[in-house]
């Protein structure tokens, strides 16, 4: 059905549009605020979304950004005032299909909405290509088994243990189980055991009372309290320290716990979903994981297949990620030729879906043309060797002025003088930035070239490291060779926090 959603705090606007659209055969659903619309999008979606910009409790542009992140193909029409040029520009920059200037002609508005419906074509919503509607894509038999299991388990209150390699999508499955459960209107709270120092995990899980330890200046609610009535997702459960395993077992057994430093027993109603990439049975045998806790968590086990076991999904996933990355960057999505697609399908993807997504992001930025060939792929994918990039020699730390890039040179080929090609590309970018500055340059002028490039460099390096380590800051700091405090400070400065 051609469903159109209208979001506006003005009841008269909602009423007029609803009447006019229903008269033209559209199914209409109206919302008074952005928050209600975003909540509804978790379980359904229209063919076209029409939204005002200024509304109490939510900004239409902010909602547009959120919608485009999760539903990049959904046409969004923004309503704005004639004089609000900045909002109109912002709307288009963030992916709006079109905007309606208030006050608008009703017949023109209906025609614009009809054009948006036609523009999307007769294709089904984004679930068409194997998307289950929960943010997970897959047509392979192994993934269809996962979808069926989610359907059966979603309405059940039982504890689920999700296993699978890093990057295979365990948190997406946990969110899907929550979204389709009777607890969907309650919080979904996630905690990665490997990303938080062990000495802080107890407080993170159970909270603490004021004065419970040095620095505890006020009472703090833990994740169990934050997830009350909803779902608590404990990722990398195999890294939970032994002392904390005992406390978690107690909560799973009788639903009671104490805050750190507290004397009052608290009751919790939370569904626990755990995940791990480790073999918990082996950790039980080695004494690193409690056997009784393992059996409490392992009521229902759901295994996510690695990407190499579902190669038929690689084409589907790659197209999806290329479209999404292009939408994020406000660019046309790039296309893979047959040879490049075959090379992607032949690669083993040790980082699984996360690694494939990162590859598509890299291609969106680095591939020189809209048609991606084998020569445009990252070196480890071209060679079929997942460790090729790691084994490549690091660029010399001695400053070298790179020569002008050779025409047709590979992006990753080493250039003369020992400098890697990325530094050559950087050299070219600096030249272009300097060439665009006023001439002649005067002392009183200021420049942010160095600060801007440094910020871009640090954002790329830290972003790649955090994605590679699954958000584990300590692991990322060790791999990059910087201090834990340094990486925390940089993440805050660069706005990379979750």
Image (cartoon, rainbow, N blue to C red):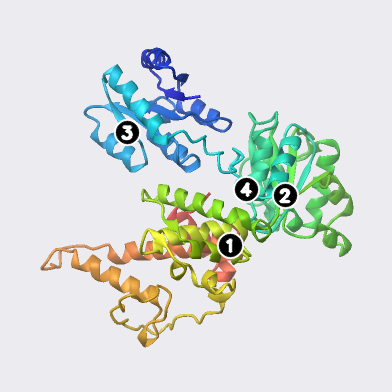
CA distance for labels 2 and 1? 43 Å
The answer to which of marks 1 and 3 sits earlier in the sequence is 3
The answer to which of marks 2 and 4 sits earlier in the sequence is 4
Dot 2 falls on a residue whose secondary structure is helix
CA distance for labels 4 and 3? 32 Å
- Residue linked to disc 1: 345
Residue 137: image tag: none
Q: Identify the residue at image location x=10%, y=68%.
A: 440
Q: Identify the residue at image location x=63%, y=47%.
A: 139
Q: Which residue extends farthest bottom?
A: 417
Residue 465, placed above or below residue 98: below
- Residue linked to disc 3: 98
Dot 4 falls on a residue whose secondary structure is loop
Left or right? Give the position of 357 relative to 297: left
Q: Which residue extends farthest front?
A: 338
Dot 3 falls on a residue whose secondary structure is strand
- Residue linked to disc 4: 138
Answer whether labels 4 and 3 touch (C-beta < 8 Å): no
Residue 388, placed above or below residue 267: below
Q: Identify the residue at image location x=73%, y=45%.
A: 145
Left or right? Give the position of 447 relative to 328: left
């Amino acid at each position: 059905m051609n469903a159109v959603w209208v979001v506006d705090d003005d009841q008269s606007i909602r009423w007029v549009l609803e009447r006019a659209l229903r008269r033209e055969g559209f199914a209409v659903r109206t919302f008074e605020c952005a928050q209600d619309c975003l909540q509804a999008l978790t379980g359904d979606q229209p063919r076209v979304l029409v939204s005002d910009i200024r509304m109490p409790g939510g900004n239409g542009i902010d909602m547009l950004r959120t919608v485009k992140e999760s539903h990049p193909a959904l046409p969004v029409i923004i309503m704005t005032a004639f004089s609000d040029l900045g909002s109109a520009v912002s709307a288009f920059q963030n992916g709006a299909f079109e905007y309606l200037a208030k006050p608008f002609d009703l017949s023109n508005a209906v025609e614009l909405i009809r054009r948006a419906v036609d523009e999307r074509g007769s294709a089904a919503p984004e679930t068409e290509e194997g998307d289950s509607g929960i943010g997970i894509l897959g047509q392979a038999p192994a993934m269809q088994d996962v979808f069926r299991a989610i359907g059966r388990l979603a309405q059940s209150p039982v504890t689920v243990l999700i296993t699978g390699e890093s990057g295979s999508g365990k948190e997406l499955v946990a969110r899907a189980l929550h979204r389709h459960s009777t607890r969907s209107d309650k919080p979904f709270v996630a905690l990665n055991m490997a990303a938080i120092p062990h000495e802080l995990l107890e407080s993170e899980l159970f909270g603490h009372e004021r004065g419970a330890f040095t620095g505890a200046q006020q009472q703090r609610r833990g994740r169990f309290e934050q997830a009350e009535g909803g779902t608590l997702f404990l990722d990398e459960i195999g890294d939970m320290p032994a002392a904390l395993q005992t406390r978690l077992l107690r909560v799973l057994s009788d639903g009671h716990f104490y805050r750190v430093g507290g004397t009052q027993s608290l009751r919790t109603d939370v569904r626990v979903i755990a995940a791990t990439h480790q073999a918990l049975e082996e950790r039980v045998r080695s004494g690193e994981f409690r056997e009784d806790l393992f059996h409490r968590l392992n009521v229902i086990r759901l295994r996510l297949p690695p990407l190499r076991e579902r190669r038929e999904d690689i084409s589907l996933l790659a197209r999806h990620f290329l479209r999404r990355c292009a939408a994020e960057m406000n660019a046309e999505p790039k296309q893979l030729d047959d040879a490049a697609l075959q090379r992607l399908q032949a690669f083993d993807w040790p980082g699984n879906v996360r690694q494939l997504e990162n590859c598509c992001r890299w291609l969106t930025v680095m591939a020189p043309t809209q048609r991606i060939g084998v020569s445009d792929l990252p070196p480890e994918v071209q060679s079929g060797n997942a460790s090729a990039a790691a084994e490549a020699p690091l660029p010399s730390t001695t400053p070298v002025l790179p020569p002008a890039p050779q025409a047709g040179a590979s992006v990753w080929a080493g250039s003369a003088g020992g400098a890697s090609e990325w530094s050559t590309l950087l050299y070219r970018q600096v030249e272009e930035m300097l060439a665009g500055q006023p001439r002649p340059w005067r002392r009183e002028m200021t420049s942010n070239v160095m600060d801007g490039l440094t910020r871009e460099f640090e954002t790329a390096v830290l972003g790649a490291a955090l994605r590679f380590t699954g958000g584990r800051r300590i692991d990322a700091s060790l791999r990059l060779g910087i201090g834990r405090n340094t990486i925390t400070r940089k993440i805050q400065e660069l706005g990379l926090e979750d």
